[in-house]
Image: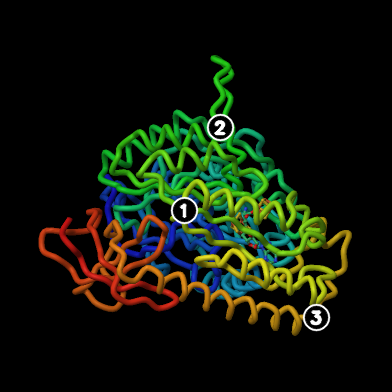
Amino acid sequence: MRDKITQKTFNPLTLEKKIEEEKQGTAYHGNSNDESEKLAYIETYGCQMNFSDTEIVASVLSEMKYGFTNDESKADVIFINTCSIRENAESKVWNRLKSLKQTKKNRPDLLVGVLGCMAERLKSKLLEQEKLVDMVVGPDAYRDLPRLIEEAGGGQKAVNVLLSREETYAEIAPVRLNTNGVSAFVTIMRGCDNMCTFCVVPFTRGRERSRDWQSIVNECQELVTEGYKEVTLLGQNVDSYKHLNEATGEVCNFAQLLEKVALIHPDLRVRFSTSHPKDITDDVLFTMAKYENICNYIHLPVQSGNSRILELMNRGYTREWYLNKVKRIREIMPDCGISADIITGFCSETDEEHEDTISLMKAVKFDYSFTFAYSERPNTPAAKRMKDDVSEDVKKKRLQEVIELQNLHSKESNLSEIGKIRKVLIESNSKRSDNDFCGRTDQNKMVVFPKKEGLSFGDYCRVKIREASSATLKGEIVEE
Ligand code: SAH
Ligand code: SF4
Ligand code: F3S
C-alpha cells in the first residue's frame, strides 16, 4: 500500500540541490496502522540519490512496523539524512543537530540518528566528540538499522559506517515518500570512482557499483503498474553503468539499460542523471534519439571552461572535448535540452581562466545551470594537494557573473519556446493557483497552464507556449 499524502514535487533531474531549499520531512503514513507501535520522522538533505536512499530507509523501517509522521514532536525516532558536498550543506545540519540535542533534553526516550554522507565523513565525531546523536549510519549500512535502533534503544551509541563494494539495495522495494504519484526515482548505481579532486562523494559513498539491470527493470515495471508515468534513473555517473551477470556472462551497459527501461511502456517517460562528459557515448545518444519516451534532456556538468582547471579537477576532459560532446548531442538530437553544474574560484583559477568559463557558457548557451562557489572539503585530493587560494570575495563575484549570464541564457532559451506546441506530463497543481496545472516538457522545462476538465495528474497533454520568463513557461492546452 502506498499512500500519497503530499504533492511536493521537485525537479527530478537535479542530482545536486541547494541544501537550503532541500529539507523535507516525510509525510507518509502508509504503514501507520494499528500494528505500528512507533513513529519515525525522516528529514532529507542533499542530492536526489539521498532522497532515493531515504525511501530505502523507509522501507527498512516499515518492515520493522514503524509508521511515519511529518510532525517531529510525535516521533519516537528522528533521522536526518545528510549531505557533505559543500561546507554550508554541513553547517545547516550541525545547527539542526544542536537544536535536536535541546529537544532530547526534554524527551529522553527520543532517538536521533544521522544517516548519509555526513555520517560517513564524520563518523564518531558526531557520537563521541559532540555527543549529539544516538546513531550514526553510513549510506551502505541501512540494512543494519534494526540492530542499530535496538542498540541505541538499549542506551548504547550505535554506529555502522562500513562502505560496501557490493551493496545496491537491489531487492529492497523503496517506500515512495512525498510522491506526486507521477514521477519516481530509481537508483541504478552507487558510489563513484572518478575522484574529481574537489569532491567528497567518493569518500562518503565509496566505490562505484552497478545494480542488477533486471531488478531495475522490475522496479520500473512495478512503478508502471502503480500508475507512475516517469522514472529518473539515478547515479553519480550513469554513463559508467555496467552490470555483469556472473552466471550468464551477460553485460549490460547504460545505453542497453536505457533501452530496456524505455521498452517497458511507451507512455513511461525515462530520464536520467547525472551524465559525465568523459563517459557519455554515441550509443547513449542514439538510444535517446531512437525512443520517443526517453526525454531529450541531458544534465552534463562542465565545472569549468578552462582546460588547465579541468585537469586540476581531474575531470578527464578538456574544454574542446566538452564542446565537441555538446556538438555531437545537438547533431544527434537537435532539440535536446542541456544543463550543467559550474564551480567558480577553484584553486588557482585566474581571471582569464574564469573568462574561459564565461566564454564556454556563451558558446553552449545552457538551458539551465547549477552554480557553486568552490568549497574546500577536508581530505579530498584538492584539500591535500592544492591551495584554496581564490578569496571568498572573488569566488562570489565570479559566481554572480555566472549566475547573471545563466539567467540571460535561460530566459533566451525559454523565449525561444514561445509559439511551440510541447507534449507535457501533468505533474501537479501550479504552486500559485489550483486553477492551473504544471508539468514538464521533454526538454525538462516547467510549464504552467490552465486546467482542462477530464485531465489530471499523470496525463499527457499538448500545450502551446504563450509566455516565458527565465524560470517558467506559460501556455494553454491545445487539441491534437
Ligand atoms: N556526479 C555529479 C555531481 C555530483 S555533486 C557529476 O560529476 O557531475 C553535484 C555538483 O556539486 C558537482 O557537479 C559540482 O558542481 C558541485 N560540487 C561538488 N563538490 C563541490 C565543492 N567542493 N565545492 C563546490 N561545488 C562542488
Ligand atoms: Fe564527485 Fe566527480 Fe564523482 Fe561527480 S563524478 S560524484 S563530481 S567525484
Ligand atoms: Fe549527494 Fe551530498 Fe552525498 S550531493 S552523494 S548527499 S555529499
Can residue 379 be spotted in the picture?
Answer: yes
Crowd band around label 3 with a 10 angstrom C-alpha radius: few (<14), some (14–19), many (20+): few
Q: Would you name the residue on which mark 3 appears?
A: 391
Tell me the tag on residue 125.
none
Crowd band around label 1 with a 10 angstrom C-alpha radius: few (<14), some (14–19), many (20+): few
Q: Residue at x 47, y 45 (%)?
A: 233
Mark 2: which amino acid?
A: Asn
Q: Is residue 362 toward the left or the right of residue 296 in the image?
A: right
Q: Quadrant of ligand 3?
A: bottom right
Q: Which of labels 3 and 1 is toward the front?
A: 1
Separation of marks 2 and 1 at Cα, in angstroms? 24 Å
Q: Residue at x 52, y 78 (%)?
A: 408
Q: Is mark 1 within 8 Å of ligand 1?
A: no
Which SS class for mark 3? Answer: loop
- Disc 3 + disc 1, Cβ < 8 Å: no
Can residue 161 be spotted in the picture?
Answer: no
Q: Is residue 400 toward the left or the right of residue 273 in the image?
A: right
Q: Which of labels 2 and 3 is toward the front?
A: 2
Q: Residue at x 47, y 58 (%)?
A: 337
Q: Position of residue 98 (x, y in %)?
A: 61, 73
Tell me the tag on residue 253.
2
Q: Quarter of the image containing the N terminus?
A: top left
Q: Position of residue 439 (x, y in %)?
A: 31, 62
Mark 3: which amino acid?
A: Ser
Separation of marks 3 and 1 at Cα, in angstroms? 40 Å
Mark 1: which amino acid?
A: Pro
Tell me the tag on residue 334.
1
Q: Is residue 219 toward the left or the right of residue 163 in the image?
A: left
Residue sitting at the far left: 453
Q: Which of labels 2 and 1 is toward the front?
A: 1
